[in-house]
Amino acid sequence: MQFKRRYICTSSMFYTDCIVVIAAVFSIQFKHLANRFTCTCNDSLVACDEYSNRNLIVNDKWRKTVEGEPSFSGTTVACALFKVDRVHGANVGDSKIVLATKNPNYGDRGEPAVLAKELSKTHRPDDAEEKQRIENLGGTVYVNGNGMARILWQRGLSPANSLPRPNLSRSLGDLWSYTENREYVMSPIPHTFTHFVEDDDLFYVIASDGVWDVMEPQEVVKIIHEISGGPTTRNDMVNKKALISIALQTIVHSAYRAWHKKCCLADNISCIIIYYYTK
């Protein structure tokens, strides 16, 4: 494997409820941090929710609705830690981490130049394992007329106050779902992964559901690749930076227009590209 450095370029629009975190680790002195990332990320996200629950809900400092119930306001999370030869990542909810790689079959009829590979996992209530977990905790999965699965949230003690809420099953900060058994219907426990860098890896895209709900991963990496070009060296990065910025703006504006075509208010649209370049 060739030694690859990294270039990070970010762009965001309507950055309201999605956290996207990037950490770069190149020095050998941080190897223990990187090796423990997938373990500590789980503990950190859960501890964050428990801290909020203890200090806001229990102490009655959490913002209330007009009915006097605790309001709901969570966030999806996607984060990645980069080392020289590997990437550690974690996510909750529907923010995704997607890798773009060279297509070995490019040149054959209809084959694209790059392929999209999802490294994260989208957490939806209708996923079999997630649905079982939710129901085991006393929650209910509701499917609306459009076929979208949501968690049914009972506000207060009256079943009449039950409302279909999130269309995802994991998040950070949805404290309304904290049960008497100290577990979350909307779980903060992340999916984690480790990806070992290969020579055909080109770039990563980390984006919120405002992008992925209206654009397929293959479409996104195709746009970025066509605008920014293929593999590059450090000397080429001076010219490449402007092209990557254009590609990012194209993604967020394409997503924004797609939301309006659906006659919907645009969801939060956030996008980050981590682009590889060699010496």
Image: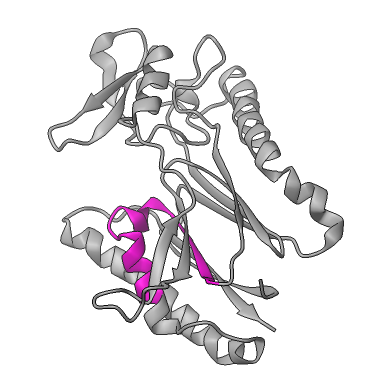
Give the residue at the far right of this rendering.
Answer: 29
The quadrant in which residue 254 appears is: bottom left
Assign the N terminus to one quadrant of the image: bottom right
Q: Looking at the image, which residue is at 47% across and 30% down? A: 174
Residue 244, position in %: x, y? 48, 79
Location of residue 70 with respect to 28 vertically, above or below: above
Where does the magenta region start and end? 200-224
* Nearer to me, 77 or 268: 77
Is residue 250 in view? no
Residue 96, position in %: x, y? 45, 52
Q: Looking at the image, which residue is at 33% across and 70% down? A: 253
Is residue 163 in view? yes
Q: Looking at the image, which residue is at 29% across and 56% down? A: 266
Location of residue 78 with respect to 5 vertically, above or below: above
Residue 218 is a magenta residue: yes
The quadrant in which residue 160 appears is: top left
Residue 108, position in %: x, y? 29, 78
Residue 212, position in %: x, y? 35, 55
* Nearer to me, 75 or 22: 22
- Residue 146 is left or right of residue 167, and the answer is left
Residue 259 is a magenta residue: no
